Image (cartoon, coloured by chain):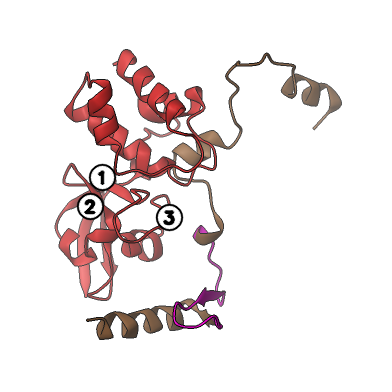
Amino acid sequence: MRVSLTVNGAPRVADVWGGDSLLTMLRDTLELPGSKNACEQGECGSCSVLLDGQLVCACLVLAAQADGHEVVTVEGLANGNELHPVQATFVEAGAVQCGFCTPGLVVAVADLLERVPDPSEDEVREALSGNLCRCTGYVKIFDAVRLAQERR
Amino acid sequence: MSVAAQQTRLRVGKIGERLLRDDAIPKVRGEFAYSSDLSVPGMLWATRSEASTRTRASSRSTCRRHWRSRASTRS
Protein backbone atom coordinates (compact mmCIF):
# COMPACT_ATOMS: atom_id res chain seq x y z
CA MET A 1 0.00 0.00 0.00
CA ARG A 2 1.05 3.56 -0.59
CA VAL A 3 1.53 6.00 2.27
CA SER A 4 1.92 9.75 1.83
CA LEU A 5 3.14 11.77 4.75
CA THR A 6 5.35 14.64 5.78
CA VAL A 7 8.67 13.64 7.31
CA ASN A 8 10.88 16.29 8.82
CA GLY A 9 9.07 18.95 6.84
CA ALA A 10 9.32 17.25 3.45
CA PRO A 11 6.51 15.39 1.65
CA ARG A 12 7.36 11.68 1.29
CA VAL A 13 5.66 8.73 -0.35
CA ALA A 14 6.38 5.13 0.59
CA ASP A 15 5.15 1.76 -0.62
CA VAL A 16 4.80 -0.47 2.42
CA TRP A 17 3.23 -3.73 3.51
CA GLY A 18 0.04 -3.19 5.54
CA GLY A 19 1.66 -4.71 8.63
CA ASP A 20 4.78 -2.58 8.53
CA SER A 21 5.35 -0.32 11.49
CA LEU A 22 6.08 3.36 11.15
CA LEU A 23 9.58 2.50 12.38
CA THR A 24 10.16 -0.05 9.61
CA MET A 25 8.96 2.44 7.04
CA LEU A 26 11.18 5.21 8.41
CA ARG A 27 14.28 3.02 8.65
CA ASP A 28 13.98 0.65 5.70
CA THR A 29 11.80 2.42 3.16
CA LEU A 30 12.52 6.10 3.78
CA GLU A 31 16.15 5.40 4.76
CA LEU A 32 16.07 7.38 7.99
CA PRO A 33 17.85 5.00 10.39
CA GLY A 34 18.23 7.63 13.15
CA SER A 35 15.23 6.18 15.01
CA LYS A 36 16.55 2.98 16.52
CA ASN A 37 14.99 -0.45 16.49
CA ALA A 38 15.71 -2.12 19.82
CA CYS A 39 12.83 -3.80 21.69
CA GLU A 40 10.19 -3.38 18.98
CA GLN A 41 7.46 -3.54 21.64
CA GLY A 42 7.25 -0.03 23.03
CA GLU A 43 9.35 -0.58 26.12
CA CYS A 44 12.67 1.08 25.36
CA GLY A 45 11.74 4.35 23.64
CA SER A 46 14.67 4.18 21.21
CA CYS A 47 12.32 4.70 18.27
CA SER A 48 10.56 7.77 19.73
CA VAL A 49 9.33 10.21 17.08
CA LEU A 50 6.75 12.97 16.97
CA LEU A 51 3.54 12.12 15.11
CA ASP A 52 1.56 15.34 14.60
CA GLY A 53 3.54 16.76 17.51
CA GLN A 54 2.76 13.85 19.83
CA LEU A 55 5.53 11.66 21.16
CA VAL A 56 5.04 8.04 20.05
CA CYS A 57 7.05 4.86 19.79
CA ALA A 58 7.35 4.41 16.03
CA CYS A 59 7.43 0.62 16.53
CA LEU A 60 3.88 0.68 17.91
CA VAL A 61 2.35 2.80 15.14
CA LEU A 62 1.49 1.25 11.80
CA ALA A 63 3.01 2.95 8.79
CA ALA A 64 -0.52 3.19 7.40
CA GLN A 65 -1.64 5.17 10.44
CA ALA A 66 0.84 7.88 9.55
CA ASP A 67 -0.78 8.37 6.12
CA GLY A 68 -1.58 12.06 5.72
CA HIS A 69 0.17 12.96 8.96
CA GLU A 70 3.36 14.69 9.95
CA VAL A 71 6.34 12.91 11.46
CA VAL A 72 9.45 14.45 12.99
CA THR A 73 12.39 12.16 13.67
CA VAL A 74 15.72 12.85 15.35
CA GLU A 75 17.14 13.71 11.92
CA GLY A 76 14.67 16.60 11.72
CA LEU A 77 15.61 18.38 14.95
CA ALA A 78 18.80 20.14 13.95
CA ASN A 79 18.66 23.21 11.75
CA GLY A 80 21.35 22.37 9.21
CA ASN A 81 24.67 22.40 11.04
CA GLU A 82 23.11 24.03 14.08
CA LEU A 83 22.16 21.44 16.69
CA HIS A 84 18.80 21.57 18.44
CA PRO A 85 19.42 22.98 21.97
CA VAL A 86 18.69 19.56 23.47
CA GLN A 87 21.16 17.87 21.11
CA ALA A 88 23.79 20.44 22.11
CA THR A 89 23.33 19.90 25.84
CA PHE A 90 23.44 16.11 25.43
CA VAL A 91 26.86 16.53 23.80
CA GLU A 92 28.08 19.01 26.41
CA ALA A 93 26.85 17.12 29.45
CA GLY A 94 28.38 13.83 28.31
CA ALA A 95 24.92 12.28 28.15
CA VAL A 96 25.92 10.18 25.13
CA GLN A 97 27.83 6.96 25.59
CA CYS A 98 26.99 4.06 23.30
CA GLY A 99 24.31 6.40 21.99
CA PHE A 100 21.72 3.84 20.96
CA CYS A 101 19.06 5.35 23.24
CA THR A 102 20.15 8.91 22.41
CA PRO A 103 17.90 9.61 19.38
CA GLY A 104 14.79 8.58 21.35
CA LEU A 105 15.85 10.51 24.43
CA VAL A 106 16.68 13.65 22.46
CA VAL A 107 13.25 13.57 20.81
CA ALA A 108 11.54 12.90 24.16
CA VAL A 109 13.37 15.74 25.92
CA ALA A 110 12.72 18.16 23.05
CA ASP A 111 9.03 17.23 23.31
CA LEU A 112 9.00 17.64 27.10
CA LEU A 113 10.57 21.10 27.04
CA GLU A 114 8.19 22.14 24.27
CA ARG A 115 5.17 21.16 26.39
CA VAL A 116 6.56 22.01 29.84
CA PRO A 117 9.18 24.74 29.61
CA ASP A 118 10.19 24.49 33.27
CA PRO A 119 9.66 20.88 34.39
CA SER A 120 10.29 19.71 37.93
CA GLU A 121 12.71 16.87 38.63
CA ASP A 122 9.74 14.51 38.95
CA GLU A 123 8.25 15.68 35.68
CA VAL A 124 11.57 15.07 33.90
CA ARG A 125 11.83 11.57 35.37
CA GLU A 126 8.22 10.81 34.49
CA ALA A 127 8.67 12.11 30.92
CA LEU A 128 11.78 10.01 30.37
CA SER A 129 10.49 6.89 32.11
CA GLY A 130 9.74 5.37 28.71
CA ASN A 131 13.31 5.73 27.48
CA LEU A 132 15.76 3.11 28.66
CA CYS A 133 19.50 3.74 28.80
CA ARG A 134 21.92 1.02 29.81
CA CYS A 135 25.14 3.07 29.92
CA THR A 136 24.83 6.40 31.64
CA GLY A 137 22.82 5.72 34.78
CA TYR A 138 20.70 8.70 33.64
CA VAL A 139 22.64 11.22 35.76
CA LYS A 140 24.25 12.96 32.81
CA ILE A 141 21.03 12.72 30.82
CA PHE A 142 19.25 14.63 33.60
CA ASP A 143 22.18 17.09 33.62
CA ALA A 144 21.59 17.64 29.90
CA VAL A 145 17.88 18.23 30.45
CA ARG A 146 18.58 20.69 33.24
CA LEU A 147 21.11 22.53 31.08
CA ALA A 148 18.66 22.77 28.17
CA GLN A 149 15.96 23.95 30.56
CA GLU A 150 18.18 26.70 31.98
CA ARG A 151 19.06 27.95 28.52
CA ARG A 152 15.51 28.35 27.34
CA MET B 1 47.12 13.58 11.46
CA SER B 2 50.35 15.41 12.32
CA VAL B 3 52.04 14.90 15.67
CA ALA B 4 51.34 18.52 16.61
CA ALA B 5 47.64 18.09 15.80
CA GLN B 6 47.54 14.86 17.79
CA GLN B 7 49.11 16.56 20.79
CA THR B 8 46.52 19.33 20.61
CA ARG B 9 43.77 16.73 20.40
CA LEU B 10 45.11 14.61 23.23
CA ARG B 11 45.69 17.49 25.61
CA VAL B 12 45.78 16.56 29.26
CA GLY B 13 42.50 17.15 31.08
CA LYS B 14 41.48 17.08 34.70
CA ILE B 15 39.49 14.48 36.59
CA GLY B 16 35.84 15.46 36.46
CA GLU B 17 36.32 17.74 33.49
CA ARG B 18 33.75 17.33 30.74
CA LEU B 19 35.32 16.34 27.45
CA LEU B 20 33.57 16.36 24.12
CA ARG B 21 33.30 12.90 22.61
CA ASP B 22 34.10 12.77 18.91
CA ASP B 23 31.12 10.52 18.26
CA ALA B 24 28.61 12.51 20.33
CA ILE B 25 27.50 14.91 17.59
CA PRO B 26 26.72 12.27 14.95
CA LYS B 27 24.95 10.26 17.67
CA VAL B 28 22.65 13.11 18.81
CA ARG B 29 21.86 13.88 15.17
CA GLY B 30 20.89 10.27 14.46
CA GLU B 31 23.61 10.06 11.84
CA PHE B 32 25.90 7.58 13.54
CA ALA B 33 25.58 4.25 11.72
CA TYR B 34 25.32 1.20 13.97
CA SER B 35 25.67 -2.26 12.48
CA SER B 36 21.88 -2.58 12.28
CA ASP B 37 21.78 0.64 10.23
CA LEU B 38 24.08 -0.68 7.53
CA SER B 39 22.68 -2.07 4.33
CA VAL B 40 24.32 -3.01 1.06
CA PRO B 41 22.74 -4.70 -1.96
CA GLY B 42 22.54 -8.46 -1.49
CA MET B 43 23.51 -8.26 2.17
CA LEU B 44 22.56 -11.30 4.24
CA TRP B 45 20.85 -11.01 7.60
CA ALA B 46 21.05 -13.68 10.26
CA THR B 47 18.49 -14.14 13.00
CA ARG B 48 18.32 -16.76 15.72
CA SER B 49 14.82 -18.08 16.03
CA GLU B 50 13.32 -18.41 19.51
CA ALA B 51 12.06 -21.92 18.80
CA SER B 52 15.42 -23.39 17.97
CA THR B 53 19.03 -22.41 18.28
CA ARG B 54 19.57 -22.89 14.57
CA THR B 55 20.81 -19.74 12.97
CA ARG B 56 18.88 -18.56 9.97
CA ALA B 57 20.59 -16.54 7.32
CA SER B 58 18.62 -14.78 4.66
CA SER B 59 18.45 -11.75 2.47
CA ARG B 60 16.47 -8.86 3.87
CA SER B 61 13.45 -9.53 1.65
CA THR B 62 13.32 -13.23 2.62
CA CYS B 63 13.79 -12.27 6.22
CA ARG B 64 10.82 -9.92 6.08
CA ARG B 65 8.67 -12.54 4.35
CA HIS B 66 9.55 -14.91 7.17
CA TRP B 67 8.56 -12.30 9.71
CA ARG B 68 5.31 -11.65 7.89
CA SER B 69 4.36 -15.31 7.87
CA ARG B 70 5.13 -15.51 11.58
CA ALA B 71 3.12 -12.35 12.23
CA SER B 72 0.11 -13.72 10.35
CA THR B 73 0.09 -16.95 12.36
CA ARG B 74 0.46 -15.21 15.69
CA SER B 75 -2.70 -15.62 17.75
B46 is within the stretch colored magenta: yes
Secondary structure type for disc 1: loop
The reply to whether the C-beta atoms of the residues labelled 1 and 3 are less than 8 Å apart is no
Tell me the quadrant of the picture where the C terminus of chain A can be found: top left
Residue A21: quarter of image: bottom left
- The x, y position of residue B49, in whole percent, is 47, 78
> Of the residues shown, which amino acid type is indicated by label 2?
Thr
Give, as a single range, the part of the protein colored magenta. B37-56
Ranked by sequence position, the earlier of labels 2 and 3 is 2
Asked whether the viewer can see residue A73, the reply is: yes
> Of the residues shown, which amino acid type is indicated by label 1?
Gly
Locate residue A65 relative to residue B30 in the image: left or right.
left
Chain in brown on the image = B
Locate residue A15 relative to residue B2 in the image: left or right.
left
Tell me the residue at 40%/55% (across/down).
Answer: A32
Secondary structure type for disc 3: loop
A91 or A142: which is nearer to us? A142
Residue A33's label in the rendered image is 3
The reply to whether the C-beta atoms of the residues labelled 2 and 1 are less than 8 Å apart is yes
Chain letter of disc 3 in the image: A
Per the picture, the main secondary structure of the magenta-coloured stretch is loop
Tell me the quadrant of the picture where the N terminus of chain A can be found: bottom left
A56 is within the stretch colored magenta: no
Bin the neighbour count of mark 3 within 10 Å (Cα to Cα): few under 14, some 14-19, many 20 and up.
many
Chain letter of disc 1 in the image: A
- The x, y position of residue A60, in whole percent, is 24, 60
3D distance between C-alphas at marks 2 and 3:
16 Å
> Of the residues shown, which amino acid type is indicated by label 3?
Pro
Tell me the residue at 46%/26% (across/down).
Answer: A140
**Residue that label 1 marks:** A9
Secondary structure type for disc 2: strand
- The x, y position of residue A59, in whole percent, is 29, 59
